[in-house]
Amino acid sequence: MTRNDGVLSNARVVLADHVIETGWIALSNGTIAEVGEGRPPERGEDFGGDLLLPGLVELHTDHLEAHYMPRPKVHWNPVAAVVSYDGQLATSGITTVLDSLRVWREEGIAEADGEAEILAGAIAAARSDGLLRIEHFLHLRCEVPMPGVVAEARSLLGRPDVRLISLMDHTPGQRQFRDERKLRDYYRGKKGGLSDAELDRLFAQRIRNQETHGSRNYSALVELAARHATPLASHDDTTLDHVQQSVADGVAIAEFPTTVEAAEALHAAGVRVLMGAPNLVRGGSHAGNVATADLARAGTLDILSSDYVPASLLMAALGLPAAASNHDLPAAVRTVTKTPAEAVGLHDRGEIAPGKRADLIRVRVANDIPAVRSVWLRGTRVA
Ligand SMILES: [Fe+2]
C-alpha cells in the first residue's frame, strides 16, 4: 500500500452533479485538495480516460456470511473470512461498508444463528490487526419477533462501530413474503433445505413469536436505537400502515419496500428508499416484489445496495442511466456514494469535492462490464 499525495489525471471525473470529461484531482493528507479540468498542474497517475468515482458506500450486505459459511454447516475461520470478504468488497469498488449482521436466533434454521457476536468480534480483530483495506461499520439486522432479539441487540450496541439498526419481520404472509409460497421456495433452496413439514412447524412458530413478542420488541428496539443515537432502517415496508409507522418512528432509511405505493409514500416523507442492485441488474425482484428500475423511473429510488452480490453495486449504478433516463451519471453514482453516506451520518465522504476524504476508485468499462482497476482509501492505494 503506497501513500499517494499526488495527482490523478486524464480521468473522466464524476462529481456529485456533473462530469468532467477530462479532468484531474490533487490529493493531500488523505483528502481531496483540488479538482480541475484539462491538464493537471503536475504530472500524476494517468488514467487514460478511465472513470474516477468516489469510493462506493454500501449499507446492506450480508455477503460476509458466504465467506464465513461457504457450505452448509461449514464454518471458516471468522477473521480469515472477514479478510477475504474485505478484499472482495475493495475490488468491487466499495470503500465504506456496513456489514449486515443478523440478530436473529431461531430454532430450525442453521444459517447465521447467534453468529453476530462472533462476526462482530472478527471484524474488530481484523481491523485492530491492520488486515482490512476498506472501512467497516456494523448494521444490526434485528428480526423483531425473535424472543432474544432485544437482549442480543443491546449487547451488540455497546460496540462503537454500529452505524445502523434495521427492524425486520419475516413472519409468513406479509411484507417480503406476502405470498407464502415464495418463502417456502426461498427456504427449500437455502442451505440445509427444509421439508414441507419442517416449514409448517417453522412458520407456525414464527406466527406465535410475532403475536407474543412482536410489538413489545419493536418498541424496545426503537427506544434502544434512539438512546444510542443510531440511525434506524425499516425493512420490506409494504402498506401505508407500515409507512406511517416508519415515519412516526423516525426511520432514516427504508430497505426494500415491496410496493410502488409504499416506496412513493416513504420517499415523499423524506425517508431514503434503498433497493437492491441485483434486482436492477437482473431486471426484477427474486421474491416477486417491485422492480428497482420501476422505482428509479418513478423518481423514488434514493440508494442502491449490493445486498448479496458485491459487484452488483457498481454495475447497477453505471447501468442506471440506461434503465431510468431520469438519472444522469452523477445522479446514478449518488445512489451508491453521497446519499447512502449522508443517510448514516458520514458527511466526510461520498463525493469528489475539495475537503472530502480521498476514498476513490478507478474504473474501466467495456461492453457495459465495469472493472475496478485501483482503489484508494484516504489517499492511500489499497487495491
Ligand atoms: Fe426481507
Image (tube, rainbow, N blue to C red):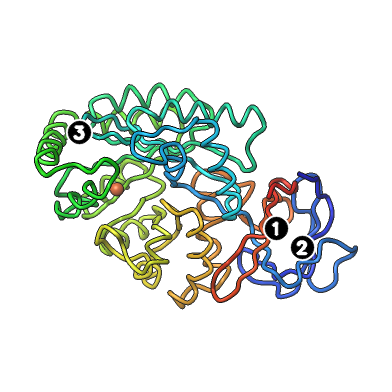
Determine the residue located farthest toward the right in the rendered image. 42
Label 1 to label 2: alpha-carbon separation: 7 Å
Q: Secondary structure at mark 3?
A: helix
The kind of residue on which mark 1 rests is Ala
Q: Earlier in the sequence, mark 1 or mark 2?
A: 2
Label 2 to label 3: alpha-carbon separation: 51 Å
Q: Residue at label 2?
A: 35
239 w.r.t. 219: above or below = below
Q: Residue at label 3?
A: 214
Dividing the picture into quarters, in which one does residue 35 lie?
A: bottom right
Label 3 to label 1: alpha-carbon separation: 45 Å
292 w.r.t. 145: above or below = below
- Image mark for residue 309: none
* Tag 2 near tag 3, CB within 8 Å: no
Provide residue 275's location: percent of width, then percent of height: 39, 57
**Number of residues whose C-alpha sits closer than 10 Å to that of mark 1, classed few (under 14), some (14–19) or many (20 or more):** some
The kind of residue on which mark 3 rests is Gly
Left or right: residue 153 compared with residue 237: right
Q: Is mark 1 within 8 Å of ligand 1?
A: no
Locate the N terminus by quadrant. top right
User: Does residue 231 show up?
Assistant: no
User: Does residue 97 show up?
Assistant: yes
The kind of residue on which mark 2 rests is Val
- Image mark for residue 353: 1
* Tag 1 near tag 2, CB within 8 Å: yes
Residue nearer the viewer, 33 or 293: 293
Q: Is mark 3 within 8 Å of ligand 1?
A: no
Provide residue 171's location: percent of width, then percent of height: 18, 42
